[in-house]
Image (spheres, rainbow, N blue to C red):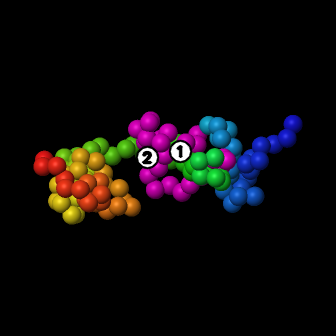
Amino acid sequence: MSRPRFWDPHGERFGLPTYPWRMAPDGLLTRRQLRKRGLRPGGQPVAAQILWHSRRSNGVRAAHLYRTCLAKPVRPMTEARAAALAAAMRARRTCPTCQRDAGYVLPAHLGTCLPCADGTPAAAA
């Protein structure tokens, strides 16, 4: 039986212990998996990685893995943090040209709302 291409549990080829898709050992989770369990990496270094081929990016993609035993609980959302996040999202939705809330996050490649980018007058809100 041959080993999968991205099998490197000692980190000799890739610099970090590396596992193929869905073959990471117990005790190592990605950021999303930690978040689902109410945890965060908490400043710990990356312990390992998962590598896989991706047709979407036409290459190899990676996901970092963190030790579950060193993870910390997610910090609770405070009123001040919620207000800061709401202000940041409002700024991402506000068009710099017409100064109205577009109702969606403005595309970064346009930098304005869609009506301003098209040159059509924005509907009165």
Q: Residue drawn at (26%, 60%), measured in percent from left and top? A: 119
Residue 80 makes an appearance in the image: no
Percent across and percent down for residue 75 are: 33, 46
Q: Residue drawn at (28%, 48%), measured in percent from left and top? A: 104
Q: Residue drawn at (53%, 44%), measured in percent from left and top? A: 30
Q: How busy is the neighbourhood of tag 1: few (under 14 within 10 Å), some, or many (20 plus)?
A: many
Q: Report the side of 82 relative to 7 (left or right).
A: left
Residue bearing mark 1: 30
Tell which circle, 2 or 1, labels the residue nearer the N-terminal end.
1
Residue 46 makes an appearance in the image: yes
Callout 2 secondary element: strand
- What residue range appears in magenta? 27-54
Which residue is most to the left?
124
* Quarter of the rendering containing residue 20: top right
Cα–Cα gap, marks 2 and 1: 10 Å
Percent across and percent down for residue 5 are: 77, 47
Q: Residue drawn at (54%, 57%), measured in percent from left and top? A: 45
Q: Exactly how many numbered labels are in the figure? A: 2
Q: Report the side of 19 relative to 75 (left or right).
A: right
Callout 1 secondary element: loop
Q: How busy is the neighbourhood of tag 2: few (under 14 within 10 Å), some, or many (20 plus)?
A: many
Q: Amino acid at mark 1?
A: Thr
Residue bearing mark 2: 40
Percent across and percent down for residue 87 are: 21, 54
Q: Are marks 2 and 1 in contact (CB under 8 Å)?
A: no
Q: Amino acid at mark 2?
A: Arg
Q: Report the side of 3 relative to 125 (left or right).
A: right
